[in-house]
Image: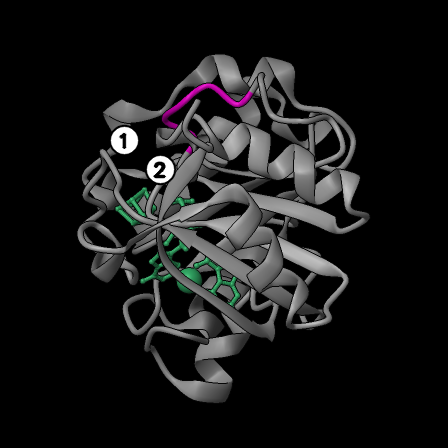
Amino acid sequence: MRAASLRITEIFHSLQGETSRIGLPTVFVRLTGCPLRCTWCDSAYAFHGGETMTLDAILDKVAGFGARHVCVTGGEPLAQKPVLALMRMLCDAGYSVSLETSGALPVDEVDPRVSRIVDLKAPGSGEVDKNLWANLDVLRPGDEIKFVLADRTDYDWACRVIREYGLDRRAPILFSPVWESLPPATLAEWVLADHLPVRMQVQLHKILWGERPGV
Ligand SMILES: C[S@@+](CC[C@H](N)C(=O)[O-])C[C@H]1O[C@@H](n2cnc3c(N)ncnc32)[C@H](O)[C@@H]1O
Ligand SMILES: Nc1nc2[nH]cc(C(=O)O)c2c(=O)[nH]1
Ligand code: SF4
Ligand SMILES: [Mg+2]
């Protein structure tokens, strides 16, 4: 049998720039390919290309960085089935693993030790119809829900979704402004004015290093 493999765009060491793990030294495994096309995607370079790597080779490369945390992202990582085995192997090897996913594909088969960061795509992404609402019913401790917001229309939509689905009772909620589109201070003012039960975040790695691959 051929060894399980994945199409990989990049593996790099950086500070976690998002979620409640922000600031933690982390190895990022970015998988190639995504069935979505968010208008503001900062990782479009991962839509095509990449290199085929066996799961063992990926584990070796990750180990070389000597970090405790691993973030599996993309592209859309759940679009490649063997990623489930990769995450299981990373957990078995003792890493603290998080997964960044679009929220458009089922998350229920992900190893329970993985912290799943599930986006809900707002209208400004152009992909609001892809949200898989059933994912909200399988969230567990350690998971987080993320809204990436481009404008006031997105913000109002997110507020409505939080209310209608009782999201604050399901998982911690992240609000993140689309980089160089919605000014972070504007989003901060809205969140404060509405006393929202959310954590606002700004992508730390872009403040430190700008928007580019490998950070
Ligand atoms: C590049 S995506 C890869 C994982 C998965 N496809 C997803 O959408 O979650 C990783 C995270 O970056 C966020 N993101 C992408 N482009 C962004 C931008 N321009 N500003 C803020 N966040 C962005 C996405 O919403 C997602 O939460
Ligand atoms: N430093 C850093 N932190 C991140 N957290 C999530 C990322 C992603 O692209 O999924 C990301 C990324 O690309 N870089
Ligand atoms: S789902 Fe993620 S990788 Fe795919 S286009 Fe949207 S932000 Fe980019
Ligand atoms: Mg990124």
Q: How far across and down, in percent of the image, does residue 208 sit? A: 50, 87
User: Label 2 sits on what residue type?
Assistant: Lys
What secondary structure is found at the residue carrying circle 2?
loop
Q: Is residue 83 above or below residue 204?
A: above
Q: Is residue 192 visible?
A: no
Give the magenta range: 103-107
Some atom of ligand 3 lies within 8 Å of the CB belonging to the residue at label 2: yes
Q: How far across and down, in percent of the image, does residue 141 sit? A: 78, 31
Camera-nearest residue between 42 and 146? 42
Q: Is residue 149 visible?
A: yes
- Where is the N terminus found, in terms of image quarters? top left
Q: What residue appears at the point 24 percent right and 24 percent down from the top-left corner?
A: 129
Q: Residue furthest right?
A: 94
Q: Which residue is mark 1?
A: 128
User: Label 1 sits on what residue type?
Assistant: Val
- Give the class, few, some or many, for how many residues have Cα within 10 Å of label 1's Cα (few <14, many ≥20): some
In the image, taking residue 39 as reference, residue 164 lies left or right, namely right
Residue 90 colored in magenta in the image: no
In the image, taking residue 161 as reference, residue 32 lies left or right, namely left
Q: Is residue 190 above or below residue 140?
A: below
Q: Are marks 1 and 2 in contact (CB under 8 Å)?
A: yes
**Could you tell me how far apart the alpha carbons at marks 1 and 2 are, in whole angstroms?**
5 Å
- Give the class, few, some or many, for how many residues have Cα within 10 Å of label 2's Cα (few <14, many ≥20): many
Residue 105 colored in magenta in the image: yes
Q: Which residue is mark 2?
A: 121
> Mark 2 or mark 1, which is nearer the start of the sequence?
2
Please tell me whether the stretch drawn in magenta is mainly helix, strand or loop. loop
